[in-house]
Image (cartoon, rainbow, N blue to C red):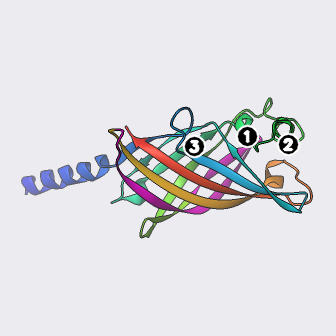
Amino acid sequence: MKRLIFAGLLLGLASVSSAATYRIDGSGAGMHTAVNFRALHLGISPLWGRFNDISGTFTYDAANIGASTITVDIDPASIDTNHAARDEHLRSADYLDVSKFPEAGFASTHIMDMGDGKMHVMGNFTLHGVTREISFEAVRTGEGETPFGDYRVGFEGELTLDLSEYGIGLAPVATINLTLAIEGVRQ
């Protein structure tokens, strides 16, 4: 009986310890992570942009998706719409106010396995000094050993944010669509 209990404890510890920690490859020379957005310019046509400074970590175990976690840090001053004057205006107090709110990011509170590499991610998103609970669906896009001698896993997801909920006014349409492509390097 003691051997069965001990074997059960070892199996339990093995399942807990099989989750790996990954560093998000989000800035610098790697930059295999993207937080892109699409907004309507004056309600007329799409305006595309991205944030160039992204970091964070996540834990992932394909056998126990529900135990996974993710934390993403975004530098809002790294906004890039391919137009320097517009980017400066977006960094100003009229929009992101990066001098007053230099941090943005997401921290998961729950991840639910939906099967076939799909998951439902819930957590807290902070922007412009406001934190709100959000959720979105994500999919594992791939994983494996790389020619760089490391192991990586990638995910993609999309969501829509109403920026007025974060105290940011965009007229006449305050919603933006975010596309997240996260690649992590196993540590």
Crowding near pointer 1: few (<14 within 10 Å), some, many (20+)?
many
What residue range appears in magenta? 122-148
Q: Are marks 1 and 2 in contact (CB under 8 Å)?
A: no
Q: Quadrant where the C terminus lies?
A: top left
Specify the quadrant of the image occupied by residue 173.
bottom right
From the viewer's perspective, is 181 left or right of 68?
right
Residue 105's spot in the image, x, y percent? Answer: 64, 43
Residue 79: give its label.
1
**First-in-chain label (1 vs 2):** 1
Q: Is residue 15 magenta?
A: no
Q: Position of residue 24 (x, y in %)?
A: 50, 41
Marker disc for residue 72: 3
Q: Amino acid at mark 3?
A: Val
Q: Magenta-highlighted stretch: main secondary structure?
A: strand
> Dot 2 corresponds to which residue?
95
Q: Which amino acid is tagged 1? A: Ile
Crowd rating for badge 3 (residues with CA inside 10 Å; few <14, some 14–19, many 20+) = some
